[in-house]
Image: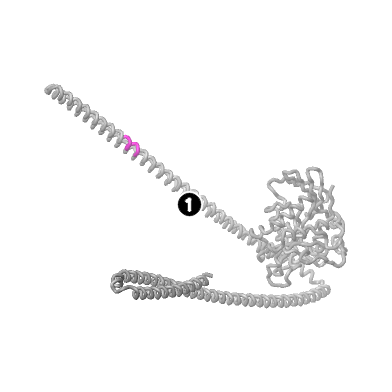
Amino acid sequence: MNFTCIIADAHTTATQEKRMKSILSFLLSTLVMFCFVATAALPAGAQQQSAPPQQAESAKADKKAAAEQKAIADQKAAAEKAAAAKEKATQKAARKAAKAAAAQKTAAQKAAAAQKAIADQKAAAEKAAAAKEKAAQKAAKKAARKAAKAAAAQKAASQKAAASQKAIAGQKAAAEKAAAAKEKAAQKAAKKAARKAAKAAAAQKAVAKKAATAQKAIAGQKAAADKAAAAKEKAVQKAARKAAKAAAAQKIAAKKAAAAQKAIADQKAAAEKATRKSAGAKKKAARKAAKKANKALAKKATAEKTAAEKAAAEQEALAQKEAAEKAATAEKQAAILKSAAQKAAKKARKKAARKAAKKANRERKRTAARELARTRIREGDQAIIDGGARIIERRNGRVIISHDDSYRFRSANTRRKVFDLTGGRKRIVLTRPNGVRIVTIRGRNNEIILRQRHLPDGQIYVLIDNRDFNRIDRRRHVKHLDLGPLRITIPRKRYIVDGRNASRRELELALTAPPVQPIRPDYTMEQIRRFERLRDSMPRVDLTNITFASDSAYIEESQIAASAELASIMKDMIARNPGEMFMIAGHTDLVGSEIYNLALSDRRAESVAIALTNYFGVPPENLVTQGYGEQFPVIPTIEAERLNRRVSVQRITPLLRTSVR
């Protein structure tokens, strides 16, 4: 639009210039013709007389024409300047357009490169996924072949065992020998533990030594504080000396004032003497002069005295302020050094304690791993591990673990009472400050027979009821649970929910959903623990945001925080129905022995239950834990796989035989 305006202005200027030229040419020709006619009509004398006015008019016209030509030239120059500016602006716009086109071309090239990179990444990802799937299929085939070989070997071993009963005596002798070796290993472990205790004592001694060093540092800080106090005292003495100097200066000023007064008195006496000698006017003038001099000297002495007092006060205040600041700085530095020394000592003690605990834990795990690796359980037998906290048994060809979960209920505010019942049973009552009582009846093998929640208003919620399960044969009780094939009619993402990517709504739907097909709520907790088909009737949440390192049940802080939403839903459900029950199942990968992985998975499930209780306040009696070892891998591979080291959560209330009174 600006370029169009400039072109229109230039065109208008050129048209006006042409019009002015034509007007001037017409005026000049008219003027020349008029002069010619006037010259022809007048006589010679008149022509001579009129010549000067004509010349003046001609000069005036020439001057006017020159001014008009100059104006036209200026307009022409302005038009040329506007045309040059227009050309320059046009070139500038062309350069900008070229730059914009180049930038657009560069952006298009970058976009094409980015699309190509995305396509390459997608192709690489598809290739990697295909390779992974192929490797998984290969591993599954390998595992199937291995399982077939193991089954064949087991069959051959059973046939061989049937034909070689003589080997039992030898096995018994080997068992006795193994027991002796185990006893020897236990003694060796005890000696090793004693050595470790000695090392721990040495570490504690080192910590004590560090504490002594810290105390020495504190003593040094105290000495520094004493030094600062001495410096403060010295500064106070210095201020006192300055004050004494100021007092001396004040005394000198007073002496000067006294001398001035004496001089005044001398002058007065001289004036009186002069007055006696002089006549009346001189006497009066002398008295006036003496009075004036006396007043001036008194004023000067007062000013000097005030200045000396003020200077002394300022010096004393400044000295006291400097001394106070130095003392405060020294005290602050001493406090900082003392705090730093205390922190260093505390940090050293904590570090040594953590190191000793970590070392003891590693050694305990190694010992447990060695014991579990040597443990072999035959059909119908039991093995007690972790100091009696867990019992492993083999039933119907499967290895099952059970444990004592009472330590999850321990709290500083909870009162615990134990009552002995008949048949080796025990009744354990836990009373909380809010009046809620948790009553658990355990059997002779510490298994849970009954667990109830007693509310202050008299309501009783039956949480676990294994009475029928403990009255009859366990193998028959599990064996004859025939529910038929499982038919899942809901989408798979709602049946198995990924806890890492699920929203609160999806988690709530999974935990509140009914069984995938109609089922009667008449099963015991032990049946649910042992019977996979029964558990598969309920949707579950896989806590994929909580994974474990190999050979570990430790949960990182960031992973615990990721379970806050799930814990909130569970607490809300328990608040609405105090009889809600949730099962937390632990799993491992296929690395290691079957029995060791079973115990490890059980500890992982307990770790999640403890985190939900300690961090988010989920009641421990509404949680049951169970380890399944390597039985249900997500990815079928015999290699170490982090996704197989996981924990899942299920609501099992619709399956339990419970009641409210």
Judged from this view, the residue extending furthest toward the left is 277
Say what secondary structure mark 1 lies in. Answer: helix
In which quarter of the view is residue 322 placed?
A: top left
Residue 608: percent from the left, percent from the top?
70, 58
Q: Classify 10 Å Cα crowding around label 1: few (below 14), some (14-19), many (20 and above).
A: some
Which colouring convention does the figure follow? one colour
Q: Which residue is mark 1?
A: 213
The one of 236 and 319 positioned closer to us in this rendering: 319
Looking at the rendering, which quadrant does residue 539 occupy?
Answer: bottom right
Q: Position of residue 584 (x, y in %)?
A: 75, 59
Residue at (81, 56) in percent of width and height: 653
Q: Is residue 653 magenta?
A: no
Q: Which residues are magenta?
A: 309-314
Picture quadrant of residue 490:
bottom right
Q: Position of residue 514 (x, y in %)?
A: 82, 59
> Where's residue 275, x and y in %?
14, 23
Of 451 and 242, which appears nearest the observer?
A: 242
Question: Residue 384: in sight, yes or no?
Answer: yes
